[in-house]
Image (tube, rainbow, N blue to C red):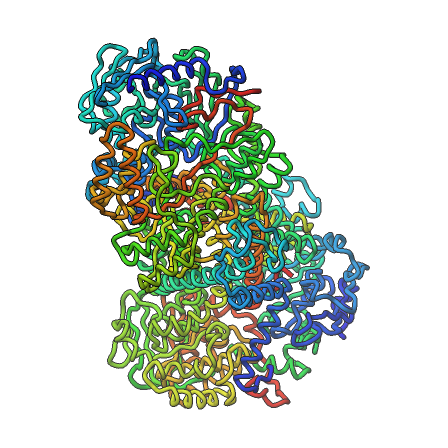
Amino acid sequence: MQKLSFIAKRLVKAVFVLLAIVVLNFFLIRAAPGDPAQVMAGEAGAADEIFIAQLREQFGLDRPLHEQLLIYVGGIVTLDMGYSYRQQQPVADLIFDRLPATLILTGTAFVISILLGVLLGALAAARVGKWTDSLITVVALVFYATPLFWIALMAILLFSVQLGWLPGFGMESVGAGYSGFQRVLDVLQHLVLPATTLGLFFMAIYARLTRASMLEVMDMDFVKTARAKGLPPGRITRVHVLRNAILPVITLAGIQAGQLVGGAVLTETVFAWPGIGRLMFDALLQRDYNLLLGVFFVSSAMVILFNLVTDVVYTLVDPRIELK
Amino acid sequence: MLKRFCTLAALAAATALTAPAALAEEPKSGGVMNVVIQPEPPGLMLGVTQNGPTQMVAGNIYESLLRYDTDLNPMPSLATAWEVNEDGTVYTFTLKDGVTWHDGEPFTAADVVFSADVFLRETHPRLRVSLQHIESIEALDDTTVRFTLKQPFGPFMGIFEVGTMPMVPKHIYEGTDFKNNPANNTPIGTGPFKFAEWERGSFIRLVKNEDYHVEGQPYLDEIYWHVIPDAASRAVAYETGKVDVLPGGSVENFDVQRLTELDNSCVTGKGWEYFAPHAWLWVNNREGPMADRRFRQAIMYALDREFAKDVIWNGLGNVPTGPVSSKTRFFDDDVRQFPHDPDKARALLEEMGYDGTEIRLLPLPYGETWQRWAEAVRQNLQEVGIEVEMVATDVAGWNQKLNEWDYDLAFTYLYQYGDPALGVARTYLSTNIAKGSPWNNVQGYANEEVDRLFAEAAVAFPDENRQSLYTEVQQVLVEDVPVAWLLEIEFPTIYRCDVKGLVDTAIGVNDGFVDAWLDR
Amino acid sequence: MSTAAASPRSAQAQAFRDFWKRFARNKGAVVGVVILLAVVVLAAVAPLIYPQSPWSMVQRPFLPPLAVDGFLFGTDTLGRDIGAGLVHGARISLLVGIVSTVVALTIGVTIGALAGYYGGLLDDALMRFTEFFQTIPNFALAIVLVAIFQPSITSVIVAIGIVSWPPVARLVRGEFLSLRSREFVQASVVLGQSNLQIITRQILPNTLSPVIVMASLMIAQAILLESSLSFLGLGDPNTMSWGYMIGAARTVIRQAWWMSFFPGVAILLTVLALNLVGEGLNDALNPRLARKGR
Amino acid sequence: MSKAAMGDAPLLQVEDLSISLPPGAERPLAVEKISFELARNEILCVVGESGSGKSMSANAIMGLLPRPHVHPVAGAIRFEGRDLLQLSEVELRDLRGSRIGMIFQEPMTALNPLMRIGEQISEVFDAHGLLTKRERKARVVELLREVGLPDPETLGESYPFRLSGGQRQRVMIAMALALEPAILIADEPTTALDVTTQAQILQLIKSLQERHHMAVMFITHDFGVVAEIADRVAVMQFGKIVEMGPARKVLNDPQHDYTRRLIAAVPHFEPPDRRSLEGPPLLSVKSLEKTYVTERGLFTAGRRVPAAQAVSFDIKKGETLGLVGESGSGKSTVGRCIVRLLESDSGEIRFGEIDLARLKGRALRPHRRHVQMIFQDPYASLNPRSKVGTIVAEGPMAHGTDRATAMARAAELLRLVGLDATAAERFPHEFSGGQRQRIGIARALALDPELLVADEPVSALDVSVQAQVLELLAEIKQRLQLSMLFITHDLRVAAQICDNIAVMKLGRIVEYGPTRRVFKDPQHSYTRELLSAVPGRHWSIPEVSVEAERQAVRS
């Protein structure tokens, strides 16, 4: 009950934040030079004033800015994100078409990175000062310091082009006509490189965070209490240290989980992954306002949603946090 | 004499019908073709959207009355024969019998009238310009259409290309809001392939039109158009055998050589004759040093256009002599020549007293090739002492800057559509100086002589008269250098050598894969 | 009690020696300093080693490393010297890294200090504002900002600064919150110092350590961010930067590995060095944490 | 060395134990060649000031030294026939919790915040492979009851944050006693607790020890606590045991000079006679109210915690008023309202003609100089980035004095509080705790205040330093004719320094009167409870002669 009212309150608050973000983005995006009518007219290979004026009218760009804003916000309130005139489809359709691909990619990367990161971080902390620790620390640092797109390119070069082990682009073998389990397998194959590349960077972050957090917790009094009880070191690490050390990891994971929905522009670009990130970038270059705002709206909503989820998860893990 | 021309053309067309380009081998039916499409088209309704990617896919779904061979001669498509009267003002087309739309409805002359006179007049700005020369379009019966012109219009026979005048179904669109008609999502044409599905961000699938009006064609069962946003990934896709065809412009030029050296890999620069993409630098004639003709000539001397062609374009294309592409009709190279000569450039700059004013250079935001080209041009100009600052923009920003004339030098390339009256004159006519379009006389060049010559040439009849007028205008323009011509571009189409019948007309892969087959 | 009757100047020297001793205990940090110094020196003497513009097309294109004397790193697609690009690029990477960090610090420290010091409604408002910026995905926002302002060195720096400040604000706010209730700050209040004096003389100097540590890591992130923007074609077209070099070379990565390899390594080393230095600084400046990890 | 009490063979023998410190520490050995014995059924108090090595000895027995830098280098610890220093980690682990139990100083952090109380206790059985699940549960309830916790069934299901400090310490004791160990090591177990809670915990430990016939090694810095529970006492200084013997003997007839000094520094519980002060009040607090409202959300009303309710008192010129009470009583809140670190909700703080409570912002600043504050924590109260001279001079400078004058005045004040002239040029971290508190006093004096608010100014200091600082305060107060509001939880200190005393509980003053009267004839039950909880109150501190002259002021 308490939890429900907490969530309700947070949701109401979130709605205001979202609306503010929508308005902010609206003006931010309109500040850019050029508009979609010009891009489309350009692509048509010819443009006269009548044509551009037609497009502007069609897009509603001939109206005063505040009116456009009202229309847009009005739409958002009724969960209508508008129509992408450029792509000639409702924005919601376009986004939800792409969302699964992004979720598969970033979700997998997310899970890989957390599992591997926490595992390696914990291992390093447990072996602090030994070579295992040094190795993990150095590897994590190197991945943390390497441009993502560079690793992606190198990975394609090695595993896809040179060795031919894995597909280097796309989400599935188009036209292969797989279905059922075969299709799943096919998608999985395509997933390996992009998910790993994306995951490695985040893995590095989690490994570093977990290690630092574990070391901090290891210094705490209750760990000494646990030792004084005669508990074996393995149990101390698992039950006492790790559970406490995981709290900051949860916080970070919550922040990142939200941002993952925004897609990974770089990874999706290099691996030709049909996701949200790329959709956003294209929409920006083409000044597809409604689509761009739609992507921002959805990804901001997801950030807020995941913040909420994190808060709730936190209360499950940490009894000290009370829901306000 | 005119009559003879037409009959001959019809005859040639008849042979083409029964035995397309490659006579040597018997085409095999069946198979799936994988092609790259970049960028993802915004829609596939060719009547509503006329950008490159749309046409490349929709060229398989829609057709027009004619096709053109690589010398820009008309060939039959939905029209099987055509006639013109003595003074070149009335054209009569005979349509093919028994053609049906993908939904089974018959294709008739009424569709032609609706398409040209109603639908495209509203939605197709480029065609609209040509339609201004037409008095009336009438369906004489179900298979005969008559176009009556106000006066002779030289390029008239060139406007029946599928991207310029696609036939759209009257029974679906009549009386609707063309641009927002939901039917645009499931395009219906008469073409060799039917729309099947579109996984946005991923692929478009077309399937064979079993009821196609040419017996035995098309040969392919399916075509997949793959959306791959990154150029390097597109190259990999071809390399790993995932796609069979890389249409022009889908990989960076630096990749072309490597890709063509692969096994079973062929390349062709053909298939662009109709468009004849012509690249140049807009030079803002209104402002600063660019207003001085000597400055513009100095730019021409400073540019190492051969280097750009060889290094950036892999040796494909030609260095142009002037405004008209050598592929386009009425081209003449009897004009002033501008070889790479930095000393001459410096001398001209000195003579005019160039004070080192910084010049802004706007590259075309179409990828790495254009970026490199801009860098090379900047370096060329800096070497003769012109200060250049490059300004980065995206497509929207580029359009805006050109529309507002907010630039000093800017890259561009434009299609010539086979005839100077369609694709060349628009750039130099002083009547075309107007803000709001990046395709008109953006550089602000005004010369009454040029205006007059272009105007006369467009309506002159027959072609000999047009040629002499166009030769003269080319000479004048090259002397004035209103823009700095860079390259006649040939976008290389890279394909598996066992893909046959791929590029055999003047618009190449944009003409659909009606003749393509796989030798596997 | 230790005797510290030495003069103030030598006391400062002593303080530095102590700092260095703590810093140098982290071997990685020393390696980081060495690499970083090398990069800085290269950037400083770039015009001496390669007097010509890095954009000059000086040799045959696609020249592999060492194929021609004097072209240690080969040439790129237009025949420009990659070596020249690397050393001139170091200047831009460092410039973007440092200036954008300064921008982020200026915004972040100001907002964090005000929010943390005054608390209450102002804190609420400023933190909501910060949340906005954290809710929109970082990189996406940077892309949009650069696209809006049009790519140039200034817009890249401003965009990176704008997306990087929220963590600074949060850090500084946290420090201010905890320092504000510290007794030495309360003592200043009781003494009658003004808010401005308290903020600048009492609290701010005490937030420096974590801020310096964060700044060193932010420079690293800014360099990565700049390279990512360039990779997407959103860099300043007039400046030769490592990010640009990789972005420009990625299409030919299979014919010419060296074009993207060397700038990639340069970024990796610089960012790595900055991270190592950051950790060393952390060990040296925040001694409580320094005990750990060794 | 004294022989083991009660005639039993000693349970634990520590022989010539030395423990190393990491290189660069102030001395090479934390503990140097110490030897002592612990017998069944006795409480041995190890007493000493901070850094004396008393905790290290305890941790060495448990094998819980922070290795590798701190480890035993010589000696032996014999327990049940084995040398603990020779045991492997696994063997030691078997002993920990089962044969030797331990409790720590900080009950707030010694329990895992994410684990239920019951689980944490039953973990002990788990670690030693004892009892079934059900038996464990029953035993946990039993243990919680034994240590006197209310409602043990539900308490076992709670998380530590629900418990008060005293309750947590009881849980720690329950945990340590779970397997009925032969030895209980208690490392300053009551230092962090309020005085009434401390009395209860001491009582608990003593009764449990008697019931289970345990040996208890009790580490403390507080001679009052020693007097309360010790059978025997070992006094440590600089890592060595300087004196050891039965409690009565050491407390009442200390032999070693250090022991004498320590005992001499313990404030007497008996308040001295004081003349009553005449004249109008300098400060007059009337009906002061302050309520804390916890974080108010957009839709939630905050929780209200009253910290000061109808608080009224007067301070005359030259008077020291003691504000005593336990944590949470609101005594610090009142102090902070008076120096205007906190905004009071209502009430008057009349200082001469002015009501300080009414002034705000800029108008307040010039009046701040009259009331200055001395803080509790000598480490937190000085800006670590400022030089000492600047710290002292800042006040006058904020009020418009030029830098040179202010710096000269600072040097003078530093001399006044017993620091030498070079101090001004140095940073706070170069000074010891006592010296820092002197700097804090100099800073407060720099503005020539008429009233000092001293918030627990000596509670973070070792007992010998505490005595010196109190002496300095008294001296300065006398010399400068200052008034003082002295906030403390330590009734011994209050007894010695205050003219009048106000006892606070839950934001209210429950008793207010002359110190001697309040101590001799307490009216309120809470005052009586507080007074009876003072450890070692029945121990009358012997008048020992301290041979060496009092250590230099700047130790």
For the view shown, which residue lies furthest in the top direction?
Answer: B98
The quadrant of the image that shows the N terminus of chain A is top left
Q: Is residue B404 left or right of residue D542?
A: left
> Residue D175, how many percent across, how many down?
62, 53
**Nearer the observer, A34 or D404:** A34
Q: Is residue C201 left or right of residue D347?
A: right
The answer to whether residue D56 is visible is yes
For residue B221, above or below residue B432 = above
**Label tally:** 0
For the view shown, which residue lies furthest in the right direction?
Answer: D81
For residue B451, above or below residue D223 = above
For residue B473, above or below residue C99 = above
Q: Quadrant of residue A76?
A: top left
The answer to whether residue B397 is visible is no
> Residue D382, how many percent across, how many down?
46, 76
**Nearer the observer, C193 or D352:** C193
